[in-house]
Amino acid sequence: MTGASDNSSTVERLDLAQLGGMLREHRGRLSLRQAAAEAGVSFSTFTRIEAGAQPDLTSFTLLCEWLGVSPAHFFTPVNERQVTPIDEAIAHLTSDPRLEPDAALKIADVLRNMYDVLAKGPAQRQVVACHLRAATTLRPGVPHRLNSMLGHMHDTLAARVAAGDL
């Protein structure tokens, strides 16, 4: 990845704290056993989820139904940064106990500068290359028609490469 690309993607995370809080609130004065029985889950499952544990899908849907809330209510969008190879290398350097933090940062700066200078974007590869040495011996008009035909082939192939078909 280059610096110009977007290095983040949006994913959704289950908000376990919100789920646990809503379970406690909805349970009110009911005991954990009574609430679990009403919701259709086991006592231990209800207790663990109320405390913030990750539910299985069946328990999650049963609890959402008991709460009267859509399961989507508990999912929040989170931007996740995708780690580039240079960021991963720098993370290894900065966590190396043999390097002082200042030394690790200096090496990281040198690496990042070198990477920025030397890393290239996706290569623009030549789709078709042709050299007609025999053009002078061809019949009149043939080099022009070949040039036109090869140019059309080149444009078609370049469009397919750009579209990701090739």
Image: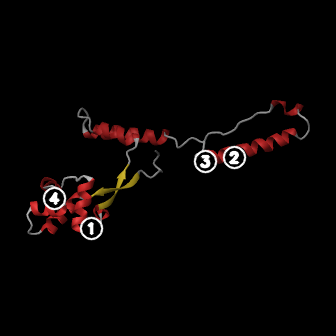
Q: Which residue lies furthest to the right in this view?
A: 140
Closer to the camera in the image, 76 or 102: 76
Q: Relative to residue 25, is residue 60 depicted above or below?
A: above
Residue type pointed to by label 3: Ala
- Taking depth in this image into account, of 19 and 123 the one nearest to the observer is 19
C-beta proximity under 8 Å, tags 1 and 3: no
Neighbours of disc 4 within 10 Å: few (<14), some (14-19), many (20+): many
Mark 4 or mark 2, earlier in chain: 4
Q: Residue beneath label 3, please?
A: 162
Of badges 4 and 2, the one in the foreground is 4
- Left or right placement of residue 154 versus residue 86 in this view: right
Distance in Å between CA atoms under marks 3 and 4: 51 Å
- Callout in the foreground (2, 1): 1
Q: How far apart are marks 2 and 1 (CA)?
A: 53 Å
Spot occupied by residue 98 in the image (x, y as percentages of width and height): 24, 32
Query: Considering the numbered disc 2 on the image, is that residue within a helix, a strand or a loop?
Result: helix
Indicate the secondary structure of the residue bearing disc 4.
helix
Q: Which amino acid does label 4 sit on?
A: Glu
Question: Going by the image, does 6 lie left or right of 79?
Answer: right
Residue 69's tag is 1
Q: Position of residue 22 (x, y in %)?
A: 19, 66
Q: What element carries label 1?
A: loop
Residue placed under numbered mark 2 in the picture: 156
Q: In this view, does 149 lie to the left or right of 96?
A: right
